[in-house]
Amino acid sequence: MTEKPEKPPEGSFVPIRDLPAAPIIFFEFCPTLGNNQGLINIMLATGIVMPTASTATDVVPVAVAHLRCSTAAATQLRDAINKALMIGAPMEPQGRAN
């Protein structure tokens, strides 16, 4: 009888498969969002520059993805975004050394 592999300890690295095949999603705003009994839904969108009949252009909003996830996954995504924002935030100037 084969034994089940042990679960990795909490916080340990879990290898992710198919990394090169995962899409890269670029978005500029989230026009809609909702929560349907714990199922989080967020539309991701961007503005596409479209030519017009004149020399001007129009920026047309276009949906690029519909994000759906559980409350737990949304919490993980929020935490990951917060951490990424903190990495890019300017550091506060250090006070004078005592």
Image (cartoon, rainbow, N blue to C red):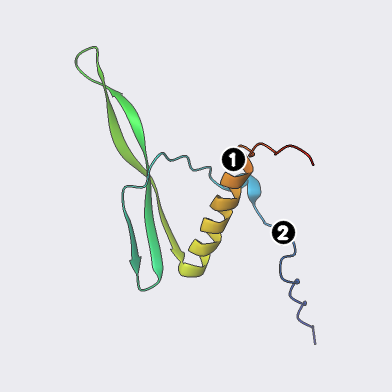
Q: Which circle marks residue 89 in the picture?
A: 1
Q: Nearer the viewer, residue 63 or 87?
A: 87
| Precedes in sequence: disc 2 or disc 1 | 2
Q: Which circle marks residue 4 in the picture?
A: none
Residue drawn at 64 percent across, 52 percent down: 18
What is the three-letter code of the residue carrying label 2? Pro
Say few, some or many: other residues with alpha carbon within 10 Å of mark 1 (under 14 / 14 to 19 / 20 or more): few
Q: Quarter of the image for the N terminus: give it.
A: bottom right
Q: As displayed, is residue 3 above or below residue 21?
A: below
- Mark 1 element type: loop
Residue drawn at 75 percent across, 81 percent down: 4
Residue drawn at 24 percent across, 16 percent down: 56
Q: Nearer the viewer, residue 95 or 7?
A: 95
Say few, some or many: other residues with alpha carbon within 10 Å of mark 2 (under 14 / 14 to 19 / 20 or more): few
Q: Which is more foreground, mark 2 or mark 1? A: 1
Can you tell which quarter of the image residue 90 is in? top right
Q: Nearer the viewer, residue 12 or 96?
A: 96
- Judge from the rendering whether residue 69 lies leftward or rightward of residue 83; answer left or right: left
* Cα distance between the residues tagged 2 and 1: 28 Å
Q: As displayed, is residue 3 above or below residue 57?
A: below
Q: Mark 2 = which residue?
A: 15
Residue drawn at 33 percent across, 61 percent down: 34
Q: Quarter of the image for the C terminus: give it.
A: top right
What is the three-letter code of the residue carrying label 1? Ala
Residue extending furthest bottom?
1
x and y, in percent, of residue 14 in the image: 71, 62
Can you tell which quarter of the image residue 67 is in? bottom left
- Mark 2 element type: loop
x and y, in percent, of residue 43 in the image: 36, 51
- Judge from the rendering whether residue 11 lies leftward or rightward of residue 37; answer left or right: right
